Image: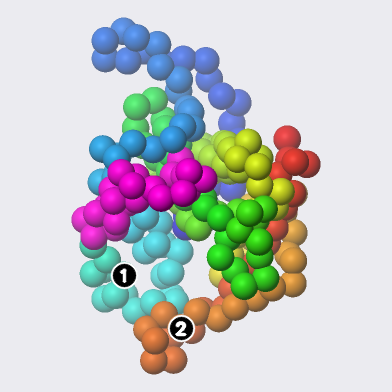
Amino acid sequence: MNHDDFGVPEPESLTAMGAADEPIAESSVRLALPAEADAIGEIQVAAWRRSYDGLLPADVLADLNPAQFAAQWRAALIAPGEARNRVMVALAGRTLVGFAAITASDDPDSDPRHDAVIAELAVDPEATRAGHGSRLLNAVVDTIRADGFSRVTVWVNSTDDVLRSFYTEAGWAPDGASRELDLYGDGSVRVKQVRLHTDPSTED
């Protein structure tokens, strides 16, 4: 996840003229298309390289392959499975600058009928500080509400104060749950995460 796009959103401009002189929204959020999987993979790798800097070895981050991520996203977009599995994208004009993936929660203490989870939310590090993360989060919560979920959660690294502040300033709060990820499966690199939650019915 990218964590720099957590300032006060800029006022949304009205329109920008496209190549064919068609007005397009300067910033918008919508459901992702399979053709956008490559751009999503590129953004995820760029965001992970920033987010996990200092947590993962530099060579591991350098070896992250956008094409591999893109292949997984393309498959998920073509065959999402349950109807409430969704990927949303943030756009600056026609340029994809961020994405979020939402699904029913599979946490042991959650009820997938009522609990959703933001599995991933990332903004291109080159497009931060323009309000895209806030617009994306607002659209995600609106979608979760429309899909009938009554609770939504997200896991954040315990040391990531910026990301945690982004969510808490938007009305989210810790729910007391935590977990430790064993990134390599051999105990050599562990990352502690805490869970935040909100009631989508109370979000504006």
Q: At x 24% / y 54%, what residue is drawn?
A: 71
Q: At x 34% / y 32%, what residue is drawn?
A: 95
Q: Earlier in the sequence, mark 1 or mark 2?
A: 1
The total of numbered circles placed on residues is: 2
Q: Secondary structure at mark 1?
A: helix
Q: What type is the residue that disc 2 sits on?
A: Asp
Residue for badge 1: 61
When asked about the image quadrant of residue 203, the answer is top right
Range of the magenta residues? 67-88
When asked about the image quadrant of residue 127, the answer is top left
- Please state which of residues 117 and 5 is positioned toward the viewer in this rendering: 117
Give the quadrant of the C terminus.
top right
Residue for badge 2: 182
Residue 62 placed where, x, y %? 26, 68
Q: Which marked residue is nearer to the observer: mark 1 or mark 2?
A: 2
In the rendered image, residue 130 lying in the magenta stretch gets the answer no
